[in-house]
Amino acid sequence: MARVVIAGAGYGGVVAGKRLEQAGQTFTMVNKHSYHQFITWLHEAAGGRHSADDYKIEITKIFRDPTCVVIKDVIIGLDRTASEIRGRRNSYPYDYAIIALGSAPEFFGIPGLAEYSLQLRSVETARQIHAHIESEFTAYKTDGDRSHLRVVIGGAGLTGIEFAGELIDWLPDLCSRNDIDPGLPEVQNLEAAPTILPVLPEHLRLKARSVLEKKGVRIRTGEKIVKVDRHTVHLESGEAIAAGTIVWTGGVKAHPLLSVAGFTCDRRGRAQVNDFLQSIDDERVFVVGDCAAFTAEGKPLPPTAQLAAQMGEMAGANVAAAIRDEPLQAFHPKIRGTLASLGRTAGVGVVVGVPTSGVLASMAKELTKVKYLIQLGGLRMISRNKRAFARE
Ligand code: NAD
């Protein structure tokens, strides 16, 4: 039987695996953790809506034995000549590989940013952000320094805005538990561009801004972060903001493996793929999600979970077809909408072309979770994750 290796168990990787499983094709999945993470909902974990552990699931629970062999290893390279994916612990020979390693934070060379900011990247970093904010509030009780109560979020894309909404809804509880005046903490969301959430139509951007500002988030557009020190954010205007917590949500780039392995990449390090999601350099290597540079209607696709899952599905189907010597299918992305949560009960977005906001948008966002879990493994997956997916 052909050897198929899936590198990475993010959205693209696990959906590719489900597709291979359906086709009766065995595969090896190599991932640095033994679990799959619900990356798009990590803001909820960071804001303490549920325990961080509720936002992950063991990969072995997603796939049925004996279709999939799950290996916990950190992938460090890919040797195209030897047809091997290299991990820290072992090497994984393949006849077909699906590269689904996701993205890494983009720091744009801003001094101090990587060292002194936290990033919402994983269950562990969500847990770290949550614990850090709690410890800053405790520190305020000791020395009375107001900067402990200031959280600066760099970037007002979907990640920054969703985190700001979740955080502001958590603060009353945090203040009450620490006996802190709820009027004292401050959440600043700094955005270099003139507007937040450029992915949404203007009236929804305004709506999102107004909802968050009413809740107490200070949104500052046209403010570019140029340097970060320990507990200080420096703006292009010369202003320095002292903050106990600095969270960077200013953008992502592809996992570095692809450029290091010599694939033809775009400026964000994403490998160029053809219509079938094969690397243009090697037809036995399929690339999906944030790692793939796929152009549709003249524009590169954005690195989103819904597209990663769609690409994973197509890559899984195409690998199964290639093994059976059947024709491959071209990938046609379907952007079904974009939803941003604005805290625990509000949201904003566009669903199948229809703008939505408020509780309805929040509920639509919850439904995307259920839909995804059904895709992964049907109702058994929902019951396993009922805490994370229960409404407040
Ligand atoms: P992003 O690139 O979409 O947004 C980053 C923001 O940071 C931009 O608005 C940018 O102008 C700003 N920025 C960059 N440098 C700055 C600086 N020096 N100072 C201040 N602001 C600066 O990044 P993201 O929000 O992490 O999203 C990454 C991808 O993931 C996107 O494609 C997004 O659509 C997707 N995503 C989707 C969802 C969802 O569907 N709900 C949620 C999160 C992320």
Image (cartoon, rainbow, N blue to C red):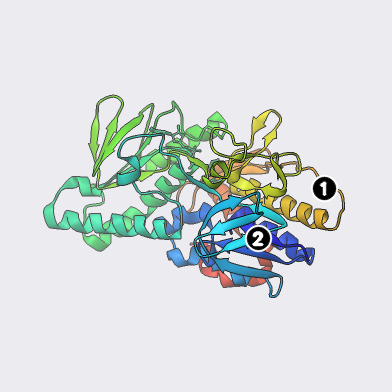
> What amino acid type is highlighted by mark number 1?
Leu
Residue type at the position of mark 2: Pro
Q: Secondary structure at mark 2?
A: strand
Does 23 sit above or below residue 148?
below
- Mark 2 CB near ligand 1 (8 Å cut): no
Tag 2 and tag 1, C-beta contact below 8 Å: no
Q: Mark 1 — residue?
A: 328
Can you tell which quarter of the image residue 150 is in? top left
Q: Nearer the viewer, residue 44 or 366?
A: 44
Asked whether 89 or 367 is in front, the reply is 89
Q: Can residue 358 be seen in the rendering of this structure?
A: no
Instruction: Identify the mark nearer the N-term, 2 or 1.
Output: 2
Can you give x and y, in whole percent of width and height, for residue 387 in the image? 51, 68
Few, some or many residues within 10 Å of mark 2 (<14, 14–19, 20+) = some
Q: Is residue 329 left or right of residue 222?
A: right
Closest to the camera, between mark 2 and mark 1, is 2
Front-most of residues 49 and 287: 287
* Residue in front for this viewpoint, 124 or 2: 2
Q: What residue is shown at x 38% (from left), y 60% (from top)?
A: 127
Q: Is residue 289 above or below residue 377?
A: above
Q: Is residue 140 above or below residue 211?
A: below
**Residue at left offset 22%, top offset 49%:** 148
Looking at this view, name the residue that lies furthest to the right.
326
Can the viewer see residue 153? Answer: yes
Residue at (56%, 57%) from the top-left corner?
A: 86
**343 sits left or right of 234 in the view:** right
Asked which secondary structure carries label 1, the reply is loop
Dividing the picture into quadrants, the one containing residue 338 is top right
Q: Residue furthest left?
A: 143
Quickly name the residue at label 2: 93
